[in-house]
Image (cartoon, rainbow, N blue to C red):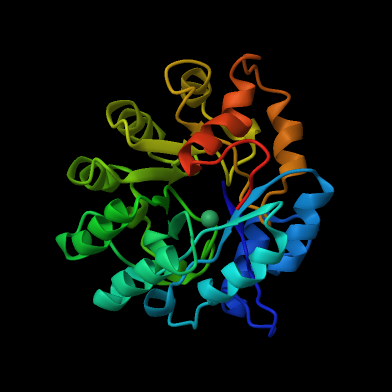
Amino acid sequence: MHTHVEADHHGHLSLDQELMDASAAYFRGEHNRTPTVDDLAAYYRARDMAAVIFTVDAGTGLDHPPLSSEEIVERAAAHNDVLIPFGSVDPRRGEAAVRQARRLVEEYGVKGFKFHPGLQAFAPDDPEFRPLWAALEELGTVALFHTGQTGIGAGLPGGRGIKLRYSDPLLLDDVAAEFPGLTIVMAHPAVPWVDTQISVATHKANVYIDLSGWSPKYFPPQLVRQLNGPLRHKVLFGSDFPVITPDRWFADLAKLEIKDEVKPLLLKENALRLLGLRTGEAA
Ligand SMILES: [Zn+2]
């Protein structure tokens, strides 16, 4: 459910070099940090896995030109056995963002959108963004939001201006309440608000959790209890590649006590239901 395209085929990167370097220092690891769509297809095909892929358009928040979601969808079409592209629009662009979202669904066929409130510098519960959530609800797409702390900007003065509070999952409770037909995914164990996140996912039928961005080794015990129990139909596998590889994520998951009947839900079935896909059918 959570894989990042970090470079396009013209050599343009999703983040500026300072943020790329800070993120690399935070997450460490040896693999390719700036995969293109073609790189991701080869990587996932070799593992017999499918991946939801996206970039983040933080053109306003980071003052850095985004990768093109339209181009990502076009490149991903050649790899529709393994890649499921989501779009990204910059909510700070107002009406233009709503129009682009509509086009990405109606003309490009994306099944969802990735938002990163910290990087995109917006509060999801701000009434200013209601037209965007209303459009996504009407279009029947998934809205996936980064929640919790972030490695982007970590260790830099002022975290490079990135505000963590925008990624508080409680802000999504407002959105979920006001747009009950909008499917929301809270990405990552939302450290330091995991209890809040569990409450929102428990209370709102339209809210899910993807378990990317942290090795399962660091999952808080209350989250493990929930995914083995009441939230078993609301949790989704994701690694956040390239910052964490699925190989490492799976190796560390194997050390957790996950019930056998929960594994197929967590690893595939919940995502298929969410995306309206059947087995054997990718994008
Ligand atoms: Zn992400």
* Looking at the image, residue 72 lies above or below residue 256: below
From this viewpoint, which residue is outermost toward the left? 127
Q: How many marks?
A: 0
Q: Quadrant of residue 54?
A: bottom right
* Looking at the image, residue 33 lies above or below residue 13: above
Is residue 35 at least partly visible in the picture?
no
Identity of the residue drawn at 56% across and 46% down: 1
Camera-nearest residue between 214 and 210 = 210
From this viewpoint, which residue is outermost toward the right? 46
* Looking at the image, residue 237 lies above or below residue 129: above
Q: Quadrant of residue 62?
A: bottom left
> Is 209 positioned to the left or the right of 239 in the image?
left
> Is 89 positioned to the left or the right of 254 in the image?
left
Coordinates of residue 229 in the picture (x, y in percent)? 47, 15
Is residue 270 at least partly visible in the picture?
yes
Coordinates of residue 272 in the picture (x, y in percent)? 55, 37
Coordinates of residue 43 in the picture (x, y in percent)? 79, 55
Identity of the residue drawn at 53% across and 77% down: 68
Q: Quadrant of residue 247?
A: top right
Coordinates of residue 10 in the picture (x, y in percent)? 68, 85
Camera-nearest residue between 273 and 144 = 273
Camera-nearest residue between 154 and 213 = 213
Identity of the residue drawn at 74% across and 67% down: 38
Identity of the residue drawn at 64% across and 44% down: 281
